[in-house]
Image (tube, rainbow, N blue to C red):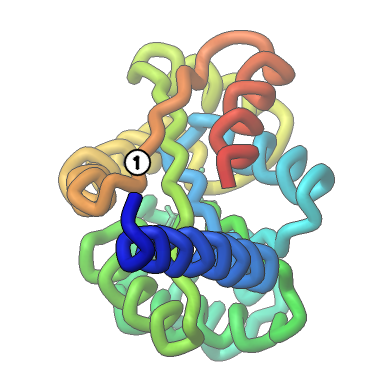
């Protein structure tokens, strides 16, 4: 190798090393945000709890926040209670504003697990824009894959344990319809960004969790 090309070679090497370091610094200081995605009864709540315990991420479940508002009879709760009881989606505008407020309430979070959000393509686009304004992004979307028969069985079981009004058969039917008409389009949205990972959501809770961890551990 001639002197000049050796110089170029060394410059490139140091540039690569510097680039690597810069990348690591960025990686360790960046927030890690995941979306846990799936139809009603897919196990998002159960798996979110396990994920936040292990990775110390902040859990944001829009369903839980809405239910807290309803329980506390806040103006927002009063506005959305009948929609939720019927199994319909809350309008995007309301949901997005609530979500953004919740993120802003946790400025020190290492990252978030979004559970039950986004449920429409408009929500997904708003989330991307909002996170970008904070210099961060969604790292991955993990979709729990569960077929419809299994979902109906699980919610029938859950109905015996909790008294969610929207777990009644006709309301549940509406929630499943909302999922297949509006929410499912969120999947190709993230697939186009190469961020989608599907995990089989049927089987032992710990085995499913292990599969989720494999995805999270890539980051
Ligand atoms: P599920 O068991 O159906 O996943 P959730 O607890 O996530 O239930 O949500 C319960 C209800 O809250 C939904 O059926 C819907 O009415 C409302 N909701 C929750 N998240 C959203 C959202 N991102 N967009 C619109 N509505 C939402």
Q: Residue 28: percent from the left, percent from the top?
A: 68, 65
Residue drawn at point x = 35 percent, y = 47 percent: 195
Q: Is residue 131 above or below residue 41?
A: below
Residue drawn at point x = 67 percent, y = 11 percent: 204
Q: Residue furthest top?
A: 203
Residue nearer the viewer, 20 or 160: 20
Q: Secondary structure at mark 1?
A: strand
Q: Residue 53: percent from the left, percent from the top?
A: 83, 46
Left or right: residue 206 compared with residue 216? right
Q: Residue 199: percent from the left, percent from the top?
A: 46, 24
Badge 1 crowding class, 10 Å Cα cut-off, few under 14, some 14 to 19, many 20 or more, is some
Residue nearer the viewer, 135 or 164: 135
The response on whether ligand 1 sits within 8 Å of label 1 is no
Q: Residue furthest front?
A: 2
Q: Is residue 32 above or below residue 71?
A: above
Question: Is residue 66 something that shows in the picture?
Answer: no
Question: Is residue 209 something that shows in the picture?
Answer: yes
Quarter of the figure with residue 138 = bottom left
Q: Is residue 182 above or below residue 123?
A: above
Residue drawn at point x = 40 percent, y = 34 percent: 197
Residue marked by disc 1: 196
Ligand 1 rendered quadrant: bottom left
Left or right: residue 169 compared with residue 194? right
Residue drawn at point x = 67 percent, y = 26 percent: 209
Residue nearer the viewer, 215 or 123: 215
Q: Is residue 104 above or below residue 161?
A: below
Number of marks drawn? 1
Q: Residue 154: percent from the left, percent from the top?
A: 55, 20
């Amino acid at each position: 190798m001639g002197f000049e090309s050796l110089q170029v070679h060394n410059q490139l090497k140091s540039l690569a090393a510097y680039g690597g370091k810069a990348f690591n610094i960025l990686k360790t200081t960046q927030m890690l945000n995941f979306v846990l995605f799936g139809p009603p009864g897919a196990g998002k709540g159960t798996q979110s709890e396990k994920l936040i315990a292990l990775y110390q991420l902040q859990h944001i479940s829009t369903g839980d926040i809405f239910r807290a508002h309803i329980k506390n009879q806040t103006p927002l709760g009063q506005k959305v209670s009948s929609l939720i009881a019927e199994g319909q989606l809350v309008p995007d505008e309301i949901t997005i504003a609530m979500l953004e407020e919740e993120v802003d309430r946790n400025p020190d979070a290492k990252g978030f697990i979004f559970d039950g959000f986004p449920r429409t393509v408009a929500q997904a686009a708003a989330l991307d824009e909002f996170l970008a304004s904070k210099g961060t992004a969604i790292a991955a979307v993990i979709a729990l894959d569960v077929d419809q028969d299994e979902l109906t069985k699980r919610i029938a079981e859950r109905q015996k344990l909790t008294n969610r009004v929207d777990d009644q058969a006709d309301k549940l039917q509406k929630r499943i319809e909302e999922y297949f008409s509006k929410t499912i389009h969120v999947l190709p949205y993230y697939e186009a960004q190469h961020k989608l990972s599907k995990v089989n959501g049927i089987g032992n809770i710990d085995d499913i969790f292990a599969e989720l961890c494999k995805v999270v551990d890539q980051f």
